Image (cartoon, rainbow, N blue to C red):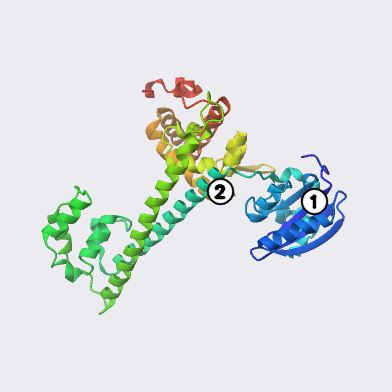
Amino acid sequence: MEPNRYRHYIGIDWATAAHRICLLDQEGQVLGKISVPHSGTGLAQLLEWLAHHGVVPAQAAVAIETPRGAVVETLVERGYAVFAINPKQLERFRERYSTAGAKDDDRDAWVGASALRTDPVAFHRVNLDAAEVIQVRELYRTHDELQGDAQRFANRLSEQLRRYYPQMLALCPAGDQPLLWDLLELAPLPEVAHQVSAGQIATVLRRRRIRRLTAEQVLTQFCTTPLHVAPGAAAAASAHALVLIAQLRTVHELRKQTLKQLILALRPMRTRRTDPLRPSDAEIVDSLPGAGTLTVAAMISEASQAVAERNGTALRTHSGVAPVTRQTGKHRGVGMRYACSQRLRNAFYHFAMTSPQADPLARHHYDELRQQGHTHARALRGVADRWIAVLMAMLRAGELYDPTRRKAWRAAPEQTP
């Protein structure tokens, strides 16, 4: 975007209840300010206010701190050029205008519009995603949130069992195992465990298809000496544990349903091709070794713009794979990037962890990094970085993954299948 290309610059200080707007002309002079509520009526009021000031959507640029939401979508659909900026970057722009640390909503809106006018390179143009991408993103985030809820409930369950029933954790160390839930419901207290028969336990093991344990081993663990706790403590902790199990079962079922919906939502994206001779982006990502449903969903939805633009640099930084270099004088340090999308970082981390099991070249690269002294996490980021380069080449060429096309193929001939 060229400087002063637009006739008007609009800064929006986004909020949950009301938004503060500042309008500048091409020379940076304030033409007006307004506050509108976060509602359909408020957004209609904003559009009328802009039209009253002679703002032409095709010749106006909008600065805002969030890349999505009702405000962004309304303005983009009306033809406005909307540019997003990280809140931390906007905070640094604010310091450029006031070293005293002054801050208010009007100032933030003005700083956004002024910074967009003078430093457009710091902003990123927002494009609306297709409806199917939005649906996949929402399902993926829902599954991610449910997974976090399940982990929190499981940790709480394990903590309750350590209080009064550690022999259960000897059978199932993690609180997220359905076998543990069944056994706890069968014997919620240590004194009740002595009344459970081997046949009841065998039924539970058979239903869960558990072969690593026998009914006799479980009974032996049940008969171990229980912890001595204060009167009523075991009953209270047991009641809490049963509530947590009910929550875990609900979250577990919701995760399964969400994953099924996500698989159905991705299916048409894999098969729909804009060019009959070239596979779709989802199909290309899915061809990567070790890429499962969640990996494909994360790359297609959380990094939709970077994938659509074939922008490997943006994908590296957005996923946290690219390191951060800090150099001053004779000191130079390279560290991990923390300013990134946590969901995308987790997706690439798990993908890099599973891909060495499916691809010998990824395994070779991981082993090399470990031999050089890098930690496990750092080596996985290196594997993910290599995969991003491969993915960008595949997307630009419109081809599925072919290990023989990689330059590293000859570097590890003994590991090729």
**Residue denoted by label 2:** 341
Position of residue 154 measured from the top left corner of the image (x, y, whole percent): 36, 60
Seen from the viewer's position, the closer of residues 154 and 84 is 84
Q: Residue at x 80, y 52 (%)?
A: 114
Q: Amino acid at mark 2?
A: Ser
Label 1, label 2: how many angstroms apart (C-alpha)?
Answer: 28 Å
**SS for tag 1?**
strand
Residue 310, image x and y in percent? 60, 33
Residue drawn at (58%, 39%) of the image: 315
Of mark 1 and mark 2, the one earlier in the sequence is 1
Residue at the spot x=74%, y=61% of the render?
A: 45
Q: Is residue 285 left or right of residue 14?
A: left
In the figure, residue 376 lies in which quadrant? Answer: top left
Residue 85 is marked as none
The picture places residue 146, in percent across and down from the top left corner, at: 43, 56
Quadrant that contains the N terminus: top right
Residue pointed to by mark 1 = 9
Q: Residue 161, how many percent across, how many down?
A: 29, 65
Along the line of sight, the residue nearer the viewer: 99 or 159: 159
> Please, what is the three-letter code of the amino acid marked with disc 1?
Tyr
